[in-house]
Image (tube, rainbow, N blue to C red):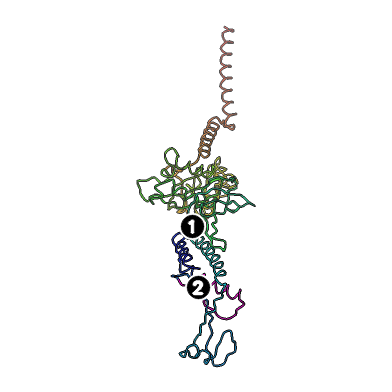
Amino acid sequence: MKLEFINALEEIQREKGVSKEILLEAIEAALISSYKRNFGSSQNVRVNIEEDTGEIQVYSQKNVVEVVEDETQEVTLEEAKEKNPNYEIGDVVEEEVTPRNFGRIAAQTAKQVVVQRIREAERGVVYEEYVNRASDIITGTISRVSKGLVFVDLGKTEGILEPNEQVPTEEYVHNQRIKAYILEVKRTTKGPQILLSRSHPGLVKRLFELEVPEIHDGVVEVVGISREAGFRSKLAVKSLDENVDPVGACVGHKGSRVQRIVEELSGEKMDIIKYSDDPREFITAALSPSKVVKVMTSEKDKAARVIVPDYQLSLAIGKEGQNARLAAKLTGWKIDIKSETQHKEAGSPNFGQEETLEVTEELEGTETAVTEENLVDEEKLVDEENRVAEEVATEVDLEDLPEETSDKKNSESSDQKTDQEAEQEEDLK
C-alpha cells in the first residue's frame, strides 16, 4: 500500500469512472473487517489511509468513562489523562495498533475490494444505459438457447427472451441477428437483467417509427395496435397534417415500407387502417378486408352489431375468430358480427336509430393497407361476387315457368288447329 497503489486508484478512476474517494472508503471499511477477523479483536478500530503516500494505520478507539465495564471498548479518565490531560468523560481515545504484517493483509483486501467495486461500477453503468432505453427497440445476436430461454448478446451485456415473449411461429438459432423490444430492465445482485420481447405490440410500433419518417417526426400518429404475434396485426393511424395520407405513408411506395416490417416479423400479416373519431366508422375500417353493410352501436354497453354480406361472414370473423378479435382489441368495442340473413332472422337489437350507421360507398372506400395474403383474399371476394351475380342472372323463377309454358303451348296448339281447319276446308271444296 504505497504510492503506486494510489496511482493505480487514480488510473481506475479515469478508465472505469469509479471515484477514488469511493474506493478508499470501501477499502477502509474492508480493512476494518479484515483486522477484526485476522487478529480476533472486538474493539472499535479506525483505519486511515494517507492519500498522498499510501501509508496505512490502524487505530483502536475507546470511550472515556468513570467506571470501566468492557476493557476492549472503554478506558478510565485517569488512564486517558496519562496520554493527554485534555481528555474528558465521553471523549474517544485513539491508539495506533497497526500489526507488523498488516500490509500484506491490507494489499489482498484492497485488491478484492477494488475488483468488486469496479465490477459493481460497470454493472451500474450498464444498468443506467439500458434502464433509459426501456420500451425501445434493440438489435442483438442470439448467443445461446437453453431450456426455452433465448439469450441475446447486446454487446456490453446479455438480454433474455423468455418463452412467453417469443413468437410461436419463429425459430431461434445460434448467431441469428434479431431485433427485440426492451420490456424491462431489473437491477440484480448479478448485474442488470434485461428482459426482451418479440411478441409485444410495442415492437410493431417501434419498427414503424424506424421505417416511416412521418411517424418518427410526429406527422402521423399511431393511435392503437392489436397483435397476435406471428399471425396478424392491426394498426390504426391518423395524420396531424391534412395533406399527408397516414395509410399511404405507412405503406410506402408499392408497399416497400410495410413489406420490410413484415419481413422483419417473419411474414406476420399487417393491416393498416385510418383512425376515425366516429366509433362506427372505426369499427368498419377495423374489420377490413371484409366489407360492412351496417353498424349499430350502443354507447352504454360499448357494444356494436355489424352486418356483413352473407358471403363475407367468414372473412369478417376470420380464421378461428382472429379478424373479429383483433378488431375488438383495436377499437375497444364488443363486436357482434351477423350476416344479412342472420340479422333478418334474429331481428334488430335495442340500438337507437341515431346510433345506426348505414355504410355508404364513401365509407366502403376507406383506405386500408393489406399484405399480399389480404390482396389475394380481395381477389377471391371479387371472383365470388361475380360468381354469385352470374348465378342470380341465370336463375329461373320456377313458379312462373308452368304458366308461361302452358300459354306458349296453348298458342302453338291454336295455331296448329287453325292450319288444320284451313286444309280441311280446301279438301271439301
The image shows residue 411, relative to residue 356, as above or below, that is above
Considering depth in this image, is 345 or 15 the residue closer to the camera?
Answer: 15
Give the residue at x 57% y 69%: 105
Residue 47's disc number = none
**Which image quarter: residue 52?**
bottom left
Q: Tell me the kind of residue under disc 2.
A: Ile
Q: Quadrant of the C terminus?
A: top right
- The percent coordinates of residue 319 (x first, y second) are 59, 44
Q: Which residues are magenta?
A: 26-50
Considering depth in this image, is 58 or 356 the residue closer to the camera?
Answer: 58
Give the foreground label among 1 and 2. Answer: 2
* Residue that badge 2 annotates: 56
The image shows residue 254, relative to residue 359, as above or below, that is above
**Which image quarter: residue 111?**
bottom right
Question: Is residue 187 magenta-colored?
Answer: no
- The percent coordinates of residue 218 (x first, y second) are 39, 52
Gap between marks 1 and 2 measured at Cα: 39 Å
* Residue that badge 1 annotates: 130
Q: How many marks?
A: 2
The image shows residue 250, relative to residue 332, as above or below, that is above
In-image side of 188 versus 19 (left or right): right
- The percent coordinates of residue 40 (x first, y second) are 62, 77
For label 2, the SS is strand
**Which image quarter: residue 403?**
top right
Considering depth in this image, is 251 or 370 the residue closer to the camera?
Answer: 251
Question: Is residue 44 magenta-colored?
Answer: yes
For label 1, the SS is helix
